[in-house]
């Protein structure tokens, strides 16, 4: 992302908006009234409820990771994640290796700001390149963050720092398994939002960087966009963007729209692309602006009808500082299109090089206020607030990635995505209640949501993306209305005081995530995994009886594989895990906290096996303990959580199994809303261990684990 915007221009661009955010930073009273007066009604919108939606508003902001913003938020997969992976060093993923054998833990921006005497809103950007993203991901081990990004990667905000964001999460629905689409920067991620993929550059290399920003020479991407599909289908859409838009209006970089821009700009004196023209407009005085505007209109008049529609919907910019007002005009006039893409200016973009979280609150507040003032529009509108990429900020959840045989998802020997988690907030009448949705999504999920709603398909989205990610519909509940939860008020925007890089404290402590849970949406997964030693290898059987494919990752801690392995499973699949030493130890993870830890001896260990079966209706986990040896074995089944701490010992069960026999133990997870975490060991064999953790879905809303 280009960052050469001066401090003078920063204030010139944002001055009009700052006072508004400072004056009113809670959810707009108009929206509160609209929520109270017009909850979503049961039975609205047809069989799947989507017919109740008339407008989808997409606001993609810049460069924040999920942990950076919401690692401290209660009830999401943040800093207290029981399913956090272990690094090859044996340390948790939160202890990122640093020079001289040290580690850096997540640390608060607030504390660094106080120590360094800086303003917490104005931290600077980090490396967010293709190579930097690959280095942090580190082949799936997730242990390259500090070396790739500096120690500032571990800095995080909390509720006091970004109260509006937390308020939105506590009022509506936050998605804690929403990923960027690629391990890279802004442009390729926005390609996925606008078109469902990022293809090749004109030179044949994969479009994994910001090459398109060299607009004077870049010919434009030659594949179609979803906006064009909507246009062809007769569905209304529009980009709302300003004279200065931080080059974030990605549709401008596609060949079809570059050609329209050249034709529209033909009379403007040498400008051949929109940013060149509008840069001149921004720097001109009133007289020159009027002249340039007239020349543009002369060029627009030469466009044919189809070209002009695309120009007005995709390329027309409005005066800096008026995006929200333009949006509000259309809301008030009843002319809001079916699909709106909001592309703010740099100062409102949330990018850590030129913006801040509190600046972004300005545009969010205005958009929600415009909808709240017209309840008849609000009750038919879904607002999707997401982030293109994580900048260089740490996130602890390894993303699902495509296996090597999915060639369209590979470049330079590495998977292109999914990328790291980024925030996603869904603001609508059907997402009220402070829910978390933990289905796996990425930017192509936004298009898939539009596909489900409009019936207009996007052929650019590959089969693997459609397999591994959902379409956002699980985040909605069209069946009944919800009360708006109580929330706290955010504060005002501080004066700009310069960019800075947070440093970790001398004495580090692992942050303690806000206590408590939150309501959780039902998910389309029901994963399981079990393993046994066969002929010196471990045979792992993966299963998933849910309606959507589940992504499993295997972490080989005893050197069974060179690096983490990946499988996408709907039904059953198998892994043959080689045992390269006297013992094996590996972990299999899956969606929504699913985890299986397998450890034991390759030969000479206890002749023990553990099989599992999930009973979704009763929310029971059936454990079949087998003894394939010649002497009686004593198994111990011990809960590690989801029961009262005082009762953990009382919940432990010892089970004797005679040679050649098996016994089944039923563990009920009903009282824990489907959550379980169990250890299984065998007396006399310290190497043998199974850990079983996850959530039993029953098709109904639950609570977070």
Image (spheres, rainbow, N blue to C red):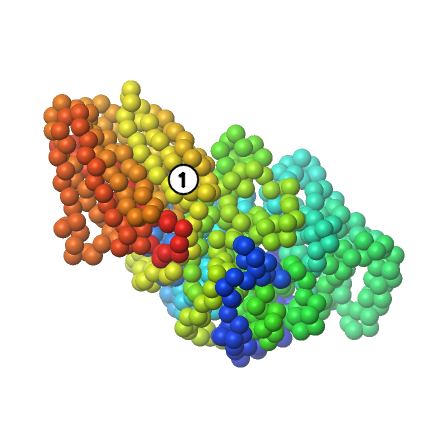
Assess disc 1: are there few (<14), some (14-19) or many (≥20) residues with their C-alpha within 10 Å of its C-alpha.
Answer: some
Q: Nearer the viewer, residue 20 or 107?
A: 20
Give me the residue at 33% from left, 27% from top. 539
Q: Nearer the viewer, residue 544 or 597?
A: 544
Relative height, residue 44 to residue 149 (above, below): below
Q: Nearer the viewer, residue 619 or 101?
A: 619
Which x, y percent locates residue 561? 38, 29
Relative height, residue 355 to residue 681 (above, below): below
Q: Can residue 281 be seen in the rendering of this structure? A: yes
Which x, y percent locates residue 644? 20, 57
Which x, y percent locates residue 614? 32, 41
Q: Which residue is most to the top? A: 535
The quadrant of the rendering that contains the C terminus is bottom left
Q: How many marks?
A: 1
Q: Which residue is mark 1?
A: 545
Give me the residue at 84% from left, 59% from top. 300
Give me the residue at 25% from left, 25% from top. 602
Q: Which residue is most to the bottom? A: 23
């Amino acid at each position: 992302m280009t960052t050469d915007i001066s401090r003078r221009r920063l204030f010139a661009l944002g001055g009009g908006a700052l006072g508004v955010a400072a004056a009113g930073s809670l959810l707009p009273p108009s929206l509160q009234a609209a929520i109270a007066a017009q909850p979503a009604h049961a039975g609205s919108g047809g069989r799947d409820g989507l017919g109740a939606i008339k407008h989808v508003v997409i606001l993609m902001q810049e460069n924040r990771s999920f942990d950076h913003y919401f690692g401290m938020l209660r009830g999401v997969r943040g800093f207290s994640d029981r399913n956090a992976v272990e690094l090859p060093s044996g340390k948790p993923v939160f202890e990122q290796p640093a020079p001289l054998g040290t580690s850096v833990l997540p640390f608060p921006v607030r504390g660094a700001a106080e120590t360094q005497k800086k303003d917490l809103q104005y931290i600077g950007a980090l490396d967010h390149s293709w190579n930097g993203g690959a280095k942090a991901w580190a082949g799936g081990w997730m242990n390259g963050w500090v070396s790739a990004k500096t120690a500032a990667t571990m800095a995080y905000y909390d509720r006091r720092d970004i109260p509006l964001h937390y308020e939105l999460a506590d009022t509506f629905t936050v998605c804690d398994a929403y990923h960027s689409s690629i391990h890279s920067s802004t442009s390729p991620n926005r390609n996925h939002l606008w078109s469902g993929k990022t293809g090749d550059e004109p030179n044949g290399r994969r479009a994994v960087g910001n090459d398109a920003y060299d607009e004077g020479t870049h010919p434009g991407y030659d594949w179609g966009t979803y906006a064009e599909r909507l246009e062809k289908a007769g569905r209304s859409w529009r980009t709302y963007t300003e004279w200065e838009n931080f080059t974030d209006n990605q549709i401008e970089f596609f060949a079809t729209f570059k050609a329209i821009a050249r034709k529209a700009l033909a009379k403007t004196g040498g400008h051949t692309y929109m940013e060149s023209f509008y840069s001149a407009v921004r720097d001109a005085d009133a007289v020159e602006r009027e002249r340039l505007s007239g020349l543009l209109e002369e060029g627009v008049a030469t466009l044919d009808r189809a070209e002009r529609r695309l120009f007005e919907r995709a390329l027309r910019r409005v005066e800096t500082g008026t995006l929200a007002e333009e949006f509000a005009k259309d809301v008030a006039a009843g002319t809001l299109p079916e699909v709106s893409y909001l592309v703010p200016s740099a100062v409102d973009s949330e990018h850590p090089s030129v913006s801040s979280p509190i600046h972004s609150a300005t545009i969010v507040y205005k958009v929600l206020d415009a909808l709240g003032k017209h309840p008849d529009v609000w009750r038919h509108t879904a607002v999707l607030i997401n982030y293109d990429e994580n900048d260089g900020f740490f996130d602890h959840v390894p993303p699902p990635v495509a296996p090597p045989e999915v060639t369209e998802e590979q470049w330079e020997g590495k998977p292109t995505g999914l990328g790291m988690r980024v925030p996603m907030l869904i603001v609508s009448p059907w997402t009220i209640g402070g829910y978390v949705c933990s289905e796996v999504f990425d930017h192509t999920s936004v298009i898939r949501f539009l596909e489900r709603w409009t019936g207009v398909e996007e052929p650019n989205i590959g089969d693997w993306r459609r397999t591994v990610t959902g379409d956002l519909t699980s985040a909605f509940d069209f069946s009944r209305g919800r009360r708006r939860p109580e929330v706290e008020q955010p504060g005002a925007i501080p004066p700009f005081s310069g960019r800075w890089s947070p440093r970790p404290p001398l004495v580090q402590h692992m942050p303690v995530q806000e206590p408590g849970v939150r309501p959780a949406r039902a998910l389309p997964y029901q994963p399981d995994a079990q393993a046994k030693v066969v002929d010196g290898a471990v045979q792992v059987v993966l299963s998933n009886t849910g309606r959507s494919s589940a992504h499993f990752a295997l972490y080989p801690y005893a050197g069974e594989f060179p690096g983490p392995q990946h499988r996408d499973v709907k039904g059953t699949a198998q892994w043959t895990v080689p045992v390269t030493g006297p013992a094996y130890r590996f972990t299999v993870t899956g969606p929504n906290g699913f985890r299986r830890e397998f450890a034991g001896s390759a030969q000479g260990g206890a002749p023990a096996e553990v099989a599992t079966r999930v009973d979704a209706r009763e929310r029971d986990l059936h454990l079949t303990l087998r003894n394939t040896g010649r002497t009686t074995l004593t198994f111990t089944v011990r809960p590690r959580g989801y029961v009262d701490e005082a009762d953990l010992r009382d919940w432990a069960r010892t089970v004797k199994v005679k040679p050649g026999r098996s016994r089944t133990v039923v563990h009920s997870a009903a009282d824990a809303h489907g959550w379980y975490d169990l250890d299984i060991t065998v007396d006399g064999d310290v190497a043998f261990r199974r850990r079983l953790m996850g959530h039993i879905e029953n098709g109904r809303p639950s609570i977070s684990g």
